[in-house]
Amino acid sequence: DAKTTQPNSMESNEEEPVHLPCNHSTISGTDYIHWYRQLPSQGPEYVIHGLTSNVNNRMASLAIAEDRKSSTLILHRATLRDAAVYYCILGTSGDKIIFGKGTRLHILP
Amino acid sequence: EPEVTQTPSHQVTQMGQEVILRCVPISNHLYFYWYRQILGQKVEFLVSFYNNEISEKSEIFDDQFSVERPDGSNFTLKIRSTKLEDSAMYFCASKLAGGYEQFFGPGTRLTVL
């Protein structure tokens, strides 16, 4: 399975944008980049996914580098509710999800 | 909004006992999954299920584990003879055919004494 590298933890102030980085230098041409998050005491929750182009949805934006070896999840205006572990995952549509340790995001009020 | 549900929310059992964890996936989803998360550790894939058969399973999913879709709405995970190390949160997930997003349930906390 292609590997991703994320910082163990990050902090951000409430109501400010957050940029969560992910490196995936061994990504294959068919791998999508998926982001999930896990709020405290909850199951994982889908955030966004993309292949080559940047993507936006109601939760976040995903910026994908031109060489696809890295990507950044952008939360435009963090709230306390966004405090969670964020997972960057590679795969195709039918795949099991292989979770790493993710980035624990702390939001400061 | 449709959601995946799981019962019970917490199950306590004695070592060696059989447990069945139940999940109701979203109704038009065709792909089903079980994952587990031991306290403080990563979420781990156990098994995927499609078209009434297992499509993939991990090394964790040994002969003590089985899955079933008994009635077209429920999706169950059975652990035949529980061990202490089976204590974990168990998450069920489901996905549309051709979709990318897996929808996770809230989990069942299994405690083996």
Image: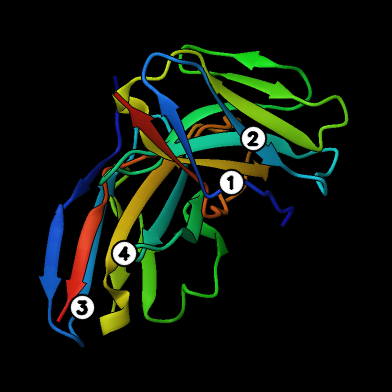
Residue holding disc 1:
A7
The residue drawn where x is 43% and y is 81% is B63
Label 1 CA crowd tier, 10 Å (few <14, some 14–19, many 20+): some
Q: Earlier in the sequence, mark 4 or mark 3?
A: 3
In the picture, the disc for residue B39 is 4
Question: Dot 4 lies on which element?
Answer: loop
SS category of the residue bearing label 2: strand
Q: Amino acid at mark 2?
A: Pro
Name the chain under label 1.
Answer: A
Judging by the rendered image, the residue that carries numbered circle 3 is B18
Q: What's the CA distance linking mark 1 and mark 3?
A: 40 Å
Q: Is residue B61 above or below residue B6?
A: below
Percent across and percent down for residue A99 are: 54, 52
Dots 1, 2 in contact, CB < 8 A? yes
Pointers 1 and 4 within a single chain: no
**Which residue occupies 21% across, 88% down?**
B16
Residue A62 seen in the current view: yes
Q: What's the amino acid at mark 4?
A: Leu
Q: Are marks 3 and 2 in contact (CB under 8 Å)?
A: no
Q: Position of residue B42 (x, y in %)?
A: 45, 59
State left or right for residue B25 relative to residue A64.
left
Answer whether labels 2 and 4 touch (C-beta < 8 Å): no
Mark 3, other Cα within 10 Å: few <14 / some 14–19 / many ≥20: some
CA–CA distance in space, label 1 to label 2: 7 Å
Quarter of the rendering occupied by the C terminus of chain A: top left
Q: Residues within 10 Å of mark 2 (few under 14, many from 20)?
A: some
